[in-house]
Image (cartoon, helix red, strand yellow):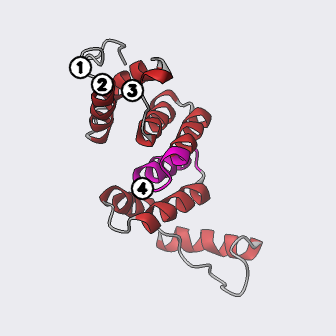
Amino acid sequence: MSDAPQIDPKVLEPRQAVWRGIDLCRNGDWEEGLTVLRHLARQEKAEFDRPGRFFSYLGYGVARFEKRHKEGVALCRHALKIEPGEPENHLNLARIYLLRKNRRGAYKALKKGLALNPHHRGLLEFYQEFGRRRPAVLPFLPRGHRLNRWLGRIRYRLFG
């Protein structure tokens, strides 16, 4: 990723640049979007207040493209402190948890986001991609029981 953005955030008013960077990320242009968001992250905080989604998208981008998952989670949690009712912040946190192979954390973040907005397109799409677990083979035993895990592996090998 280059540090020379095609859309120069210095030309835009900081608030416009924030939303431009977020929109670029939303539309899949992560390289350009992250360049804008990183530039804004280096500016003095007193200049303007950044919305929670700024930290959320920056966090997911850092985790996904720079493999700095811990920092990404911290940024998304900060976003949730600023904008706790914003479903996109929960979506980006869920995405990072899935990158970290933390399915339980991803599921919790996803459910919180869907509780805020059950019709949010991004959350619903992620939910479909995320998939659902099959029920335990022996429902009277805990899911993590050795026998359930062993039978679950056999079921997966036989039926996919």
**Distance between the alpha carbons at the discs numbered 4 and 3:** 20 Å
Image point 56% across, 74% down: which residue?
Answer: 155
Up the image or down, 148 lies above or below 12; here it is below
Q: Determine the residue located farthest toward the right in the rendered image.
A: 146
User: Under tag 4, what secondary structure?
Assistant: helix
Q: Earlier in the sequence, mark 3 or mark 2?
A: 2
Q: Position of residue 70 (x, y in %)?
A: 62, 36
**Distance between the alpha carbons at the discs numbered 4 and 2:** 23 Å
Viewer-closest of 132 and 147: 132
* Label annotation for residue 7: 1
**Distance between the alpha carbons at the discs numbered 4 and 1:** 27 Å
Q: Which residue is mark 4?
A: 87
Q: Position of residue 137 (x, y in %)?
A: 62, 81
Look at the numbered discs 1 and 2 and tell me whether their residues touch, using CB distance below 8 Å: yes
Task: Say whether residue 117 is left or right of residue 77.
Answer: left
* Label annotation for residue 37: 3
User: Mark 3: few, some, or many residues within 10 Å (few <14, many ≥20)?
Assistant: many
Q: Earlier in the sequence, mark 4 or mark 2?
A: 2
User: In the image, what residue type sits under mark 1?
Assistant: Ile
Rendered image quadrant of residue 105: bottom right
User: Under tag 1, what secondary structure?
Assistant: loop
Q: Earlier in the sequence, mark 1 or mark 3?
A: 1
Up the image or down, 90 lies above or below 96; here it is below
Look at the numbered discs 4 and 1 and tell me whether their residues touch, using CB distance below 8 Å: no
**Distance between the alpha carbons at the discs numbered 3 and 2:** 9 Å
Q: Which residue is mark 2?
A: 32
Image point 33% across, 36% down: which residue?
Answer: 22
The segment highlighted magenta reads 80-101
